[in-house]
Amino acid sequence: MTIDDLRVFTAVCRAGSLSAVARDLRCTQSAVSQHVKRLERELGLSLIERHPRGVVPTKAGRLLQTAVAAGLGSIDHALHRIAELARGEGGSVRITTGATSIRHFMSSAVVAFRRRFPQVSLEFQTEVSSRSCLAALTAGRVDLAWITLGTPVRGIDQRPVVDLPWVLAVAAGDPLAARARIEPADLQDARLIGLPQNSVARSQLDSWIGRSGIRPVFDTSVADWDTAILLAELGLGHAVVPALPQWRGPGHPGLRLLPLPDLPALTAGWAVRDWDNLCPLSRAFADTVAAHCGDEAALPVEPPVTP
């Protein structure tokens, strides 16, 4: 059993495909299979089950995957820290987040950090969900994950940075644009633009809708919040979204953001493996983003439009 065997095995479990891992590693599918078979021979149990659409870990495979992911993550994190020490003032900070989060939460912080640490490389890895960001963090591929915070995750420290109130995004000419606030009853039978499936934001919104007893219809599903805002501004639907700072001001003249005070705020922030062992550069970047979010993230209430 080698570290390479364990790395390849966890990659297979994560991808659900031998061929996908072979492409990533630029080797043959047979070579990937040999790593898994070597582990199975040593342990005396099957670790993966083959299905027409890919592979899934067995019960024993899931146990090994969980243990190996944590162990390899710690090793990779330690190796990265050692490399940082060897480089001195230079080095890199590895961040994972959604594609739109850099623009909404980090743009000014990135500029400020680069001015302070011009020799440091910022490496961004975009993911499609908070869950996949946490997977990259657990595997040791990144130092910091900016996510929508949800339930606690074992082995991960979460630090809230900004609370985002929810709003209903509508076109300026929409009949609702004159409202000072939106009540749950206003969304009964409304046709809404759906937030990304399997996201923390969508889960929280669906939970609130269920508790409120209202029955909106989700006409369209989008991949990110910015697309929902664009469609709402074009008058192609209404969107219940967290209020992000970049949506205010002259950039969106045809948009109105109406408060939904009954819906609990969504919290965004940092997730790391261990704050106490976070390298100084990563901590400096996290603190810089938090400071800039404090300056920029508060969104004023939209004044009602006089008919």
Image (tube, rainbow, N blue to C red):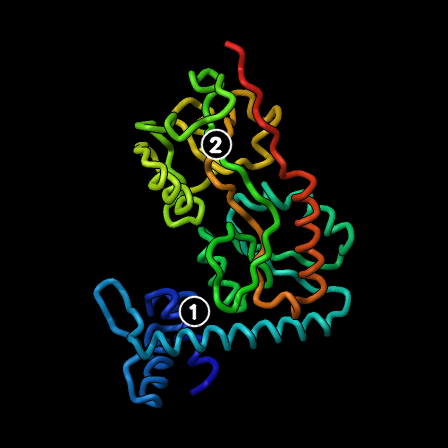
Q: Indicate left or right for 215 with 98 as reference.
A: left
Give the residue at mark 2: 260
- Amino acid under label 2? Leu
Q: Residue at x 55, y 40 (%)?
A: 164
Q: Are marks 2 and 1 in contact (CB under 8 Å)?
A: no
What kind of element bears circle 1? loop
State the image coordinates of residue 146 (x, y, percent, origin top left): 56, 53
The quarter of the picture where residue 175 lies is top left
State the image coordinates of residue 115 (x, y, percent, origin top left): 77, 50
Q: Residue at x 66, y 68 (%)?
A: 276
Label 2 Cα crowd, 10 Å radius (few <14 / some 14-19 / many 20+): many
The N terminus: image quadrant: bottom left
Q: Indicate left or right for 234 with 83 as reference.
A: left
State the image coordinates of residue 305 (x, y, percent, origin top left): 53, 15
- Amino acid under label 1? Arg
**In the rendered image, the vertical position of residue 158 relative to residue 234, given as above or below:** below
Q: Which sits in the foreground, 239 or 44? A: 239
Q: Indicate left or right for 28 with 90 as reference.
A: left
Give the residue at mark 1: 26
- Label 2 vs label 1, nearer the camera: 2
**In the rendered image, the vertical position of residue 141 relative to residue 112, given as above or below:** below
Q: Which sits in the foreground, 281 or 21? A: 281
